[in-house]
Amino acid sequence: MVRRDGRRLDEARPTTITPGFQEFAEGSALIEVGNTRVLCAASLEERVPGFLRGQGKGWVTAEYSMLPRSTNTRTPRDRDAGRISGRSQEIQRLIGRSLRAVTDLESLGERTVYLDCDVLQADGGTRTASITGAYVALHQALKMLVSHRVLPRIPLRDTVAAVSVGILDGKLLLDLCYEEDFGAQVDFNLVLTRGGALVEMQGATEGDPFSRDLVSDVVELAYRGMQPMFQAQQEALRQL
């Protein structure tokens, strides 16, 4: 099987992360995964949602949207429908959960970090790229608190990134572009820490049910394939 861009089946698309992409955000990063591009920005507020007030813990949350011409045909803005689409809600909750999983919320104190992930160009894997890029933006914002002596250390327990895996024509593929994702019989989105722990795994089939053994193969492929993404994150953070 030959992939459209000539990659091996177990090869991720090239990942580039440009940190500090926005001048005014406490943290920001432009992530490019193949032809997918997402702008991630982190904003700090000295307050938390009502359900956390007085508990001494912070919060990390996310918003996700696609620019109208990030796709082949115009995608209407959510505001045109008068509400956030179900897909956008699902993805922004996934981004928030993924980043909270590696954040020490107690050490953060009663502060909120808002992560805005805006898709500039979509060619598959926008949610996984958002998570990978948002980590860099979050790290930058938290590092600023340390440099201003608000916090004694960066309250992050591990690095987190994400990637997709799918089955197309009976073959297991890493990091699907849109064409591959559209045609896949089974597709997964996996969020893992650099230490190898699984944060979240989303998987579904459009055809026959899949075996439990397949799940183990998917996790192993994802972790091996995500190493260049972790490297891209570390290279971006070294530039700050």
Image: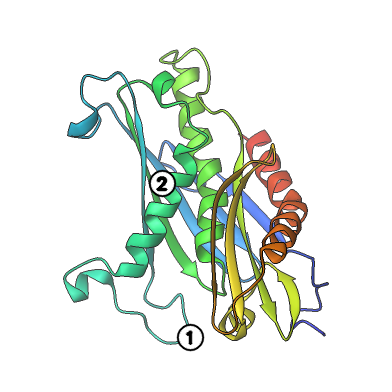
| Rendering quarter of residue 171 | bottom right
Q: Nearer the viewer, residue 202 or 235?
A: 202
Residue at image x 82%, y 84%?
2
User: What residue is pinned by disc 2?
Assistant: 96
Residue at 16% of width from left, 71% of height from top?
82
The 10 Å Cα crowd at callout 2, few under 14, some 14 to 19, many 20 or more, is: many
For residue 72, the mark is 1
On screen, residue 207 above or below 102 = below
Left or right: residue 10 versus residue 117 is right
Which quadrant would residue 42 be assigned to in this image? top left
Q: Secondary structure at mark 1?
A: loop
Query: Which of disc 1 and disc 2 is earlier in sequence?
Result: 1
Q: Relative to 104, is 119 above or below?
A: below
Query: Which amino acid, by three-letter code, is at mark 1?
Result: Asn
Residue 7, given in percent of the width and then of the height, sits at 80, 73
How packed is label 1: few (under 14 Cα within 10 Å), some, or many (20 or more)?
A: few
Residue 82 numbered tag: none
Q: Quadrant of the N terminus?
A: bottom right
The C terminus: image quadrant: top right
The answer to whether 77 is drawn above or below residue 136 in the figure is below
Mark 2 or 1, closer to the camera: 2
Q: CA distance from mark 2 to mark 1?
A: 28 Å
Q: Residue 131, how many percent across, how many down?
A: 52, 51
Q: Is residue 180 visible?
A: yes
Residue 141 percent across, percent down from the top left = 46, 33
Q: x, y percentage for residue 38?
A: 50, 60
Name which residue type carries label 2. Answer: Gly
Going 73% across and 63% down the picture, which residue do you hit?
12
Per the image, label 2 sits on a secondary structure element best described as helix
Q: Are marks 2 and 1 in contact (CB under 8 Å)?
A: no
As rendered, which of 129 and 149 lies closer to the eye?
129
Q: Is residue 107 left or right of residue 169?
A: left
